[in-house]
Amino acid sequence: MSRPIPPPHTTVAELTEAVLAGKHGPDPADLTVTSAFWLYHTTRLAGGDVTYHNHYLLLRVGDSFGACSFEAGELAPEFCENASGHSLEKLLRDESAPVRTAALDAYLSRVRPHRDADDAERVMLPTGTPEVRAQARDAAVAGLLDIEPGAKVALIGVVNPLVAAIRERGGVCLPCDLNLRTTAWGDPVTDDMTEVLAQADAVVATGMTLSNGTFDLILRHCVEHRVPLTVYAQSGSAVARAFLGAGVTGLNAEPFTFSQFSADATPMYRYRAALANGAGA
């Protein structure tokens, strides 16, 4: 049986304080990081002209991992030299947002693993090439969208297969990303999140918004305007889950090992929730 789900919070900082206060399970001071990984990974899918540059921090605590993607230069590899052996309590108070996010994800994944969650739908990514697995992943994300034909979908954090998946479901994709300027089809990509949020009938956002400080803003907008919010998360998948029913209406959680790091079948976990009932829900 899964651990009972605590009441939802309205910001990441509020959730972190609740964890530090022991409201979500054991004292994080009693949970120790056994392994720390700093990863730099690039991908260019076959036939594409975009190289994705991804940096990850991974923290292992017992039988679970916490993960957070971050921008180049935001966290040095040397962080991992002394991270193993630290308590989660210490890392939850770190000055680095990616470290805090990975630590919070490690804690929430440890006390309630996705594999044990009663409300999760397990989806297996197939064995195959990066292209096959990326298309399957993004189709699973798009499958969480309940949209009418022609609905405008803000995509915050652009990956081309997900742009295609949204269009295949009849949506009009409004792409936003800090690093990409166009999609594979030449569509302009804005770096102004408020621009696409203002037009959106639905929002799809990456878990990386948890560490770059934009998740709380997206969540508040979606609650106040009753716009469904789907999160696709390698970063902070268990953190995003804590906001189900409090603004997040769909979550595609992909805990480590991520799709791009394996050619074998690996699990993802999909969650669904109703729209929040107004600001502060």
Image (cartoon, rainbow, N blue to C red):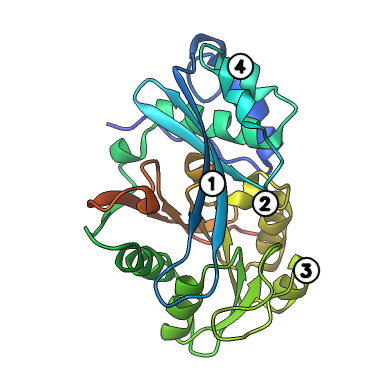
Q: Name the secondary structure under disc 2.
A: helix
> Do the residues under discs 1 and 4 have CB atoms within 8 angstroms?
no
- Disc 3 versus disc 4: nearer the observer: 3
Which residue is labeled 1 in the image? 240
Instruction: State the image quarter where residue 81 is shown.
Output: top right
Q: Earlier in the sequence, mark 1 or mark 4?
A: 4
Image coords of residue 78 (percent x, y): 63, 25
Residue 268 sits above or below residue 230 on the image: above
User: In terms of depth relative to the viewer, which is nearer, 110 or 6?
Assistant: 110
- Determine the residue positioned at 72% across, 53% down: 214
Q: What is the C-alpha distance between the residues marked 2 and 4? A: 22 Å
Q: Is residue 252 left or right of residue 231?
A: left
Q: Earlier in the sequence, mark 1 or mark 3?
A: 3
Image coords of residue 195 (percent x, y): 77, 74
Which residue is labeled 3 in the image? 192
Q: What is the C-alpha distance between the residues marked 1 and 4? A: 19 Å
> Do the residues under discs 1 and 2 have CB atoms within 8 angstroms?
yes
Q: Earlier in the sequence, mark 3 or mark 4?
A: 4
Which residue is labeled 2 in the image? 215
Image coords of residue 18 (percent x, y): 62, 26
Q: Name the secondary structure under disc 4.
A: helix
Q: Is residue 21 visible?
A: no
Which residue is labeled 4 in the image? 89
Instruction: State the image quarter where residue 182 is shown.
Output: bottom right
